[in-house]
Image: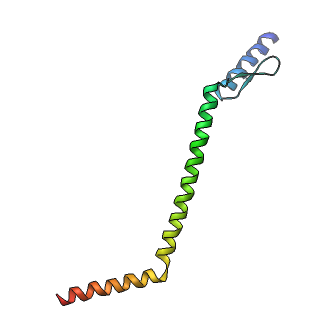
Amino acid sequence: MVAGLITFGTIFHTRMKIKNGYPLSGAWGQAVYPKTTSEDGERIKLLSQENAQLRAELGSVKDRLANVERIVTDSGYHLTHQIEALRIGETKGEA
């Protein structure tokens, strides 16, 4: 009876590890599951490169956005818009 409980407990424990994605280990501690292949290594390398490219692009976009924010919040920009609004108002009033 005790041997049956130990066997059931071991099977249940292994099943829970597989279900939750934990790696299994063999009799001598070597990794049994999941096994990594050369395809996995290449995929990780490609994803890392793509991640680096996207981070660089995001940095560039952040810099551009900061420049646009600086231009829009610049007091000269508001002054230019007010002058343009007055010009548009003058041309409508003359017509």
Q: Is residue 12 left or right of residue 86?
A: right
Q: Is residue 35 left or right of residue 47?
A: right
Q: Is residue 22 left or right of residue 43?
A: right
Q: Residue at 27% of width from left, 83% of height from top?
A: 88
Q: Residue at 66% of width from left, 29% of height from top?
A: 21
> Where does residue 52 sit, x and y in percent of width and height?
60, 47
Q: Residue at 55% of width from left, 49% of height from top?
A: 54
> Where does residue 10 sit, x and y in percent of width and height?
75, 18
> Where does residue 33 sit, x and y in percent of width and height?
69, 22
The relative height of residue 48 versus residue 74 in the rendered view (above or below) is above
**Quarter residue 6 falls in:** top right
In terms of depth relative to the viewer, which is nearer, 59 or 14? 59
**Quarter residue 87 falls in:** bottom left
The relative height of residue 21 versus residue 9 in the rendered view (above or below) is below
- Classify the position of the C terminus by image quarter: bottom left
In terms of depth relative to the viewer, which is nearer, 23 or 94? 94
